[in-house]
Image (cartoon, rainbow, N blue to C red):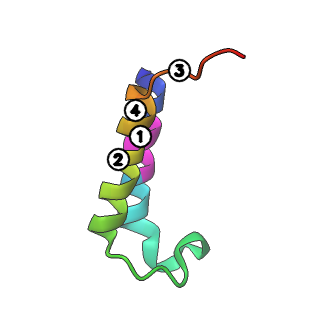
Amino acid sequence: MTMMLHCLVKGGNMMFLTRDTDPWYQGETRSTRDLAESIFQEFLDSISAKPAAAG
């Protein structure tokens, strides 16, 4: 959990620093703030999700 949070924060910081030159974000129309919010929300959703039932 701690490692996932570390990677999330490090990745978010790198996005703020390198977004203009990063090919991953070419053509992305959302603001950096909106992207960061979306990424963090997905992270929170993934750690709070209930495990899938075994079947």
Q: CA distance from mark 2 to mark 1?
A: 5 Å
Q: Residue at the spot x=47%, y=26% of the render?
A: 3
Which residue is denoted by mark 3 in the rendering? 51
Q: Nearer the viewer, mark 4 or mark 1?
A: 1
- For disc 1, the neighbor class at 10 Å (few under 14, some 14 to 19, many from 20) is some
Quadrant the C terminus occupies: top right
The correct choice, above or below, for 20 with respect to 44 in the image is: below
Q: Are marks 4 and 2 in contact (CB under 8 Å)?
A: no
The numbered dot on residue 40 is 2
Q: Where is residue 9 shown, x and y percent of the image?
A: 37, 43
Q: Residue at the spot x=41%, y=46% of the render?
A: 42
The numbered dot on residue 15 is none
Q: Where is residue 52 shown, x and y percent of the image?
A: 58, 23
Which residue is denoted by mark 1 in the rendering? 43
Q: Nearer the viewer, mark 4 or mark 2?
A: 2
Which residue is denoted by mark 4 in the rendering? 5
Q: Nearer the viewer, residue 4 or 42?
A: 42
Q: CA distance from mark 3 to mark 4?
A: 19 Å
Q: Where is residue 26 shown, x and y percent of the image?
A: 55, 81
